[in-house]
Image (tube, grey):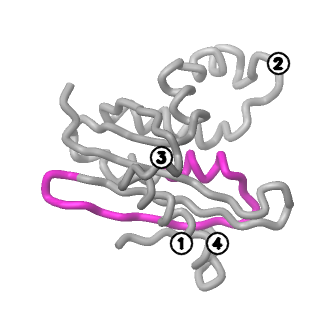
Amino acid sequence: MAENIIIYCDGACSGNQYDENVGGWGAVIKREDGVKRIYGGEVNTTNNRMELTACIKSLEDVREDDLPVALYSDSAYLVNCMNQKWYVNWQRNGWRNAKKQPVENQDLWERILTLITAVKVRFHKVKGHAGIELNELADGLANRGMDELADNEPGYSKVL
């Protein structure tokens, strides 16, 4: 399957260990006709939630294109879940993990699973902060999402 759309997405969180923190997400969506950059931020979140949000916002943007997508992320949490199909057991076990604990971020995982039924996506793991141009750009957008949070409503998103 040749991918016609390439996505690099990333999440970030400052003060991840504290209740009062800020997070950002960013994505670069490359189509034949150009490149689109999207980003946003939230308060009281986690790095993993921002990684998943970046994926969701990206897939929402391309869901009507009906073209194959290659999605690149430095989040092992996201890529391994999708490629190793962790979600199959989670669903079978009533959204409980192997330790019988509730699966974290169930709301976001369910949204991703809904989106991938409409979009043909292959997930690829990339090394973070390794000089991969579009991944570095997605990281910068995630950080911009955090930086601009003070000037926007929590949960905002922007398109460049």
Q: In the image, what residue type sits under mark 4?
A: Pro
Q: Residues at badges 1 and 3 in contact (C-beta under 8 Å)? A: no
In this view, 113 is above or below 52: above
Residue 73 image position (x, y, % from top left): 47, 42
Q: In the image, what residue type sits under mark 2?
A: Lys
Q: In the image, what residue type sits under mark 3?
A: Cys
> How far is mark 2 from mark 4, CA to CA?
33 Å
Nearest to the observer: residue 34 or residue 111: 34
**From the viewer's perspective, is the residue at label 1 or at label 4 nearer?**
1
Q: In the image, what residue type sits under mark 1?
A: Arg
User: Where does the magenta region start and end?
Assistant: 31-55
Q: Residue 55, which numbered label?
A: 3
Q: Is residue 4 magenta?
A: no
Q: Residues at badges 3 and 2 in contact (C-beta under 8 Å)? A: no
Residue at image mark 2: 99
Residue at screen point 42% across, 39% down: 115
SS under mark 3: helix
